[in-house]
Image (cartoon, rainbow, N blue to C red):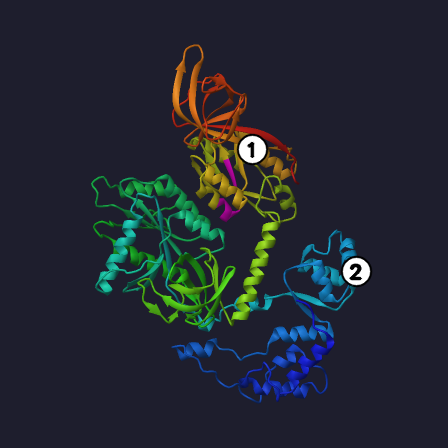
Amino acid sequence: MSTLDAETADLIIDIYRDDEVVSPVKSSDHHTAQSVETASAVEPPTIDSLATEPEQKETMPIQTTIESEDLDQKRLEPPAVDAEVLVEAQAASNGKVVQLPEALTVKDLAEALELSTKDVLLQLMSLGTVASINHVINLDMANAVVKKLGKAVTLVAEGSEDFAEELEPSEEEHLEDRAPVVTIMGHVDHGKTSLLDAIREANVQATESGGITQHIGAYEVQTPRGRLVFLDTPGHEAFTAMRARGAQVTDIVVLVVAANDGVMPQTREAVDHAKAAGVPIVVAVNKIDLADANPDRVKQQLSELDLIPEEWGGTTIYVEVSAKEELGLDDLLEMVLLQAEILELQADPYQMSRGTVVEARLDKAKGALATVLIQRGTLRVGATFVAGMHYGRVRAMFDHRGRKMEIAGPSTPVEVLGFTSVPEAGDTFMEVADERKARQISNVRQEEQRAQQLSQTNRITLDDLYRRISAGDVKDLNLILKGDVQGSVQALWEAIEKIESDKVQTRLIHGSTGGITESDINLASASNAIVIGFNVRPTPQASELAAQEQVDIRLYTVIYEVISDIRAAMEGMLEPTYTERTLGRAQVRQIFHIARVGTIAGCFMQEGSIRRNASVRLVRDSVVIHQGRVGSLRRVKDDVDEVQSGFECGIGLYRFNDIKEGDVIEAYMLEEAAPTL
């Protein structure tokens, strides 16, 4: 934003002085303009003098269409003058304040300060930054240049006042109890969906005839003791993916465990994800109607995960239910509400609304739609909002049964119509005063995202661990361990715990057996953790997601190498590392046993290429079985040096014959990379 010339600035100030001329001051603040006229006789007006409200006159009430008069009186504020215009005018006349984008070029800064680009470039060089006129700098660097030049100018970000206004704390006298938000998690076959359906069906039958006509990812349940809000997310992957974007929407997690199966790998993952989020867990032991049900075994297994039942002296609530027979559902809801009472959940319904996008989609007829969970304040039709990088105006709202709503308070899920484009799940939904503010905040966030994409990652890696420890940025080193067998994971963690450091504390977020999956990468992204794989490999989808989320994955085959690297990173003595680059991946489709030659794998090249004598590993069910090199490589009947993607070939591994159909042969090479400490 360029500054105004002095003549234009004086003209704007004269307009505000003369209350006979049409001005941006609203009629209800007519007295404010008069006070400015009086004050300006002595000295030029400032923002503070223009916004000052005299005590001798009362502000006229403003009529609104909201249902609750009490809500209106507490939410409405006296209208203020157009601060942006006045800030610009004052900057031009007095040189005090200049509003600029958070990311601006050297040329923009020079124009805002009314200097030549040469002067700005010289000051940047004195600060140790070599730049061109199109070089992008942030406001901190720009303010440093201003200070160097000795100018009495303060640079502020566009939209910064808008953000501060919306983040004001709630007043205690306005706080009211709100409904808890519950997420159901657990193993895929343990009856989560059946339990959700049973709760919804029982609730619908108790309140109205008919079923739910529209499912929007979140819904309400009415009980004699109060209201509950359930989030229907597809497993703990989505739960953690939302938390990775800063969305903490869940108050209580209901962990569903089948009484006949007990604790499964996904159950352990769900517990780890819930603990990482820091929310209380209520255990629902499902399928108690089956003959082989054993609830005590479930309690024993979960006790090993620090979920000790209350009857055993612990703090975890257990409820035995049967979704199929609809047994224990009322007890489960009552226990969840009891846990909510302990948490003392409250929110201020009189503020401008604020919430989180649960899910979003593009409807062919209606356009962009999003399910929003209101967390504080009250949202009404016609309100202007910002969600992530997108903004809009509420044209219509619907509840979880598709009925239109005019107003939505805290802990209320609604489907909002009026987005300019589709937001992402986990984006913060924030109501603002007008469309100008919404557009301004949206532009700032888009600039921030572009700058973030161009800047370096802020994820922790072993290479920069020592630098960040020294700078005080890191106090906890979060780790996710994946191994081929449980004994390896346990031994590895015990060895890591023995590493002593007075500057950093190691913390195990999750440890289990099996290959590295997308769920592990999501958890690492949300917790800023490093993933360590021992004799396992990431799936192709997990590798792609790790590159996208910039999560550090370290793969090892020897325990002491893990310990050595972590200790060296802590002490700042990390040796040059070797970055692995995958060359190709071939799937074994048929096995041939040839006398005096050995086992030959009939393969199909899925991606990349494979060369004779290339370093390879044999992977079976995401677990590394063998590491070696290619002994023979044939295409049809000819020996070849290389086979490209999309062709079939025969591969023999040097001195190794234990190959099975379905195995994957990965070709790779190691490239030396210097550490960046």
Residue 567 sits in which quadrant?
top right
Badge 2, how many Cα within 10 Å: few under 14, some, many 20+?
few
Q: Is residue 382 left or right of residue 8?
A: left
Q: Position of residue 339 (x, y in %)?
A: 36, 57
Q: The disc labelled 1 sits on which kind of residue?
A: Arg
Give the secondary structure at mark 2. helix
For this rendering, which residue is in front, 438 or 347? 438
| Residue at left offset 47%, top offset 60% | 421
Q: CA distance from mark 1 to mark 2?
A: 46 Å
Q: Position of residue 651 (x, y in %)?
A: 46, 21
| Residue at left offset 65%, top offset 81% | 49
Q: Is residue 70 left or right of residue 610?
A: left
Q: Position of residue 343 (x, y in %)?
A: 40, 60
State the residue position of label 2: 119
Q: Is residue 95 left or right of residue 499?
A: right
Q: Tell me the quarter of the image containing the N terminus.
A: bottom right
State the residue position of label 1: 581
Q: Tell me the quarter of the image containing the C terminus.
A: top right
